[in-house]
Image: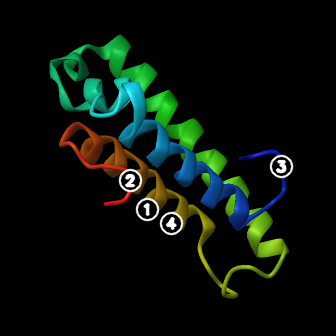
Amino acid sequence: MAGDGCGLAAVHDFFAALIEARCSGAYARWGCMVSNARAGGENSDADIRAVLDRHHGELRESLRTALVAAEAKAQLKPGTDAGAVADLLALLAYGVDLRSRAGADAGS
């Protein structure tokens, strides 16, 4: 997503693949190891929290990079804060993980 320069198409493809992986097939309802650890007791361990924070930073930066590419392609409204939108999209990705744990299917 970060390196392909496709802009919004990369963000769309990321979410489409995430929803498919989390909400259908053999691994539906598992959620995500990162989201599960973030919500569980593992989050109290400093070493694990550091790994979780690094993952979040990498996800956010990948989204931000794709949004910057989208901005360069005039796919975003001028003045859009790519960092703020990346923060929101990262939270939405974690929401997909949590919804999958709750039994959501790919269509809901």
Q: Please report whichever mark, 3 or 1, sits nearer to the chain's N-terminal start.
A: 3
Give the image quarter of residue 50: top left
As drawn, which residue projects farthest toward the bottom?
Answer: 78
**Comparing labels 1 and 4, the label whose residue is closer to the camera:** 1
Q: Which of 59/45 is in front?
A: 59
Residue kind at label 1, given as amino acid type: Leu
Please, which colouring scheme is shown?
A: rainbow
Label 4 element class = helix
Label 1 to label 2: alpha-carbon separation: 5 Å
Q: Residues within 10 Å of mark 2 (few under 14, many from 20)?
A: some
Residue kind at label 4, given as amino acid type: Ala
Q: Please report whichever mark, 2 or 3, sits nearer to the chain's N-terminal start.
A: 3
Q: Please report whichever mark, 4 or 2, sits nearer to the chain's N-terminal start.
A: 4
Residue 101 vertical position relative to residue 36 in the rendered view, above or below = below
Of the numbered discs in the image, which one, if any, rests on residue 88?
A: 1
Q: Are marks 4 and 3 in contact (CB under 8 Å)?
A: no
Of the numbered discs in the image, which one, if any, rests on residue 4?
A: 3
What residue would you read off at disc 2? 91
Q: Are marks 1 and 4 in contact (CB under 8 Å)?
A: yes
**Comparing labels 4 and 2, the label whose residue is closer to the camera:** 2
Give the image quarter of residue 70: bottom right
Label 4 to label 3: alpha-carbon separation: 21 Å
Label 3 element class = loop
Q: Residue at x 68, y 80 (%)?
A: 76
Q: Residue at x 84, y 56 (%)?
A: 5
Residue kind at label 3, given as amino acid type: Asp
Q: Residue at x 44, y 20 (%)?
A: 51
**Comparing labels 4 and 3, the label whose residue is closer to the camera:** 3
What residue would you read off at disc 4? 84
Q: Could you tell me residue 1's position as x and y percent?
A: 71, 47
**Comparing labels 3 and 1, the label whose residue is closer to the camera:** 3
